[in-house]
Image (cartoon, rainbow, N blue to C red):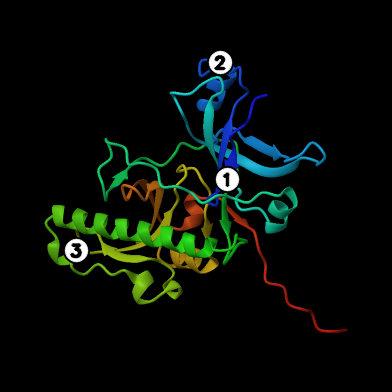
């Protein structure tokens, strides 16, 4: 009897293996490997026992597969709508495992950001950003998200400093401010930097260990700030972050958030209406 080696990690990564007879060259496996979550969607329905009904877990984004293992083929997927309500995991008896930092690739330079173009987007509308002040998390997830965010911001600070120094503006590099630390979330952005001509760059950094196409959460205050500073606001989206090499790819979008991203409200604040 074949034993499946599968799990869901605390960062929303699904470790999954194919049917035992499938190989990397199999047409179905090639469709999964070349899947683009920006043009079509793969949805996960999961059950942990034949006695249970299937539970919908949302969309999947391809991360990687193990090219050295087949029959079955081993995949890692990012759950794009992670996390589900804790009651869902409890009902299925799922305890997410702690993520392990990947080994740093020998071709990746440590402590760096690599700029890439924004991911191509299908003309078919897809789910946009989730605009929210908070969202449901697993115990301890807030702290892990904060650590990931802080690591991304430090990479962005270093990148901005190097960029200005390379442009001959060491004076401006010395004036960069980590606003998220100095002023906190109330500022509406994370880093105050500069263009080479001395004009402002108000940078919001969003970091993920998953693909660049992953949606992310952004607060109404951050959206408002981008609207009020259309010429200087920069969204720096870091993806594929590796703690082992402290490195990531990134793209940036300039101008109001709503100009570049679809926004989806996920939470409302409810207050009782006066009695009639």
Q: Is residue 108 visible?
A: yes
Work out which residue is located at the far right of the displayed protein and give it: 276
In the rendered image, the quadrant that contains the C terminus is: bottom right
Residue at x 21%, y 64% (from the top left corner): 198
Residue 28: name its quadrant: top right
Q: Which residue is mark 1?
A: 80
Residue at x 27%, y 64% (from the top left corner): 193
Residue 262 sits above or below residue 52 on the image: below
Q: Which residue is mark 3?
A: 173
- Left or right of residue 190: residue 48: right
x, y (%) of residue 52?
80, 42
- Left or right of residue 212: residue 267: right
Given this view, does label 3 or label 1 mark the residue nearer the observer?
A: 1
Residue 271 sits above or below residue 244 on the image: below
The disc placed on residue 26 is 2
Name the element at disc 3: helix
Residue 47 sits above or below residue 94 on the image: above
- Left or right of residue 159: residue 26: right
x, y (%) of residue 239?
41, 46
x, y (%) of residue 57?
67, 44
Q: Earlier in the sequence, mark 3 or mark 1?
A: 1
């Amino acid at each position: 009897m074949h034993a499946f080696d599968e799990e869901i990690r605390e960062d929303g990564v699904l470790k999954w293996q194919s049917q035992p007879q499938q190989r990397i060259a199999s047409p179905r496996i090639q469709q999964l490997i070349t899947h683009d979550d920006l043009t079509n969607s793969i949805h996960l329905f999961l059950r942990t026992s034949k006695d249970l009904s299937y539970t919908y877990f949302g969309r999947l984004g391809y991360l990687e597969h193990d090219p050295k293992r087949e029959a079955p083929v081993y995949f890692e997927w990012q759950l794009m709508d992670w996390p589900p309500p804790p009651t869902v995991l409890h009902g299925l008896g799922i305890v997410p495992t702690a993520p392990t930092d990947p080994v740093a690739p020998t071709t990746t330079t440590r402590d760096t950001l690599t700029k890439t173009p924004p991911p191509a987007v299908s003309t078919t509308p897809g789910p946009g950003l989730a605009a929210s002040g908070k969202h449901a998390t697993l115990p301890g997830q807030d702290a892990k998200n904060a650590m990931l965010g802080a690591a991304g911001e430090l990479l962005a600070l270093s990148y901005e400093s190097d960029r200005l120094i390379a442009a001959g503006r060491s004076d401006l590099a010395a004036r960069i401010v980590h606003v998220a630390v100095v002023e906190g979330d109330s500022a509406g952005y994370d880093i105050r930097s500069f263009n080479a001509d001395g004009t402002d760059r108000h940078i919001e950094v969003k970091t993920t260990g998953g693909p660049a196409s992953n949606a992310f959460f952004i607060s109404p205050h951050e959206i408002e700030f981008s609207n009020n500073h259309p010429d200087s606001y920069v969204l720096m989206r870091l993806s594929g972050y590796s703690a082992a090499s402290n490195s990531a790819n990134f793209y940036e979008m300039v101008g109001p958030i709503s100009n570049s991203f679809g926004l989806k409200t996920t939470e409302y604040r409810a207050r009782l209406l006066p009695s009639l």
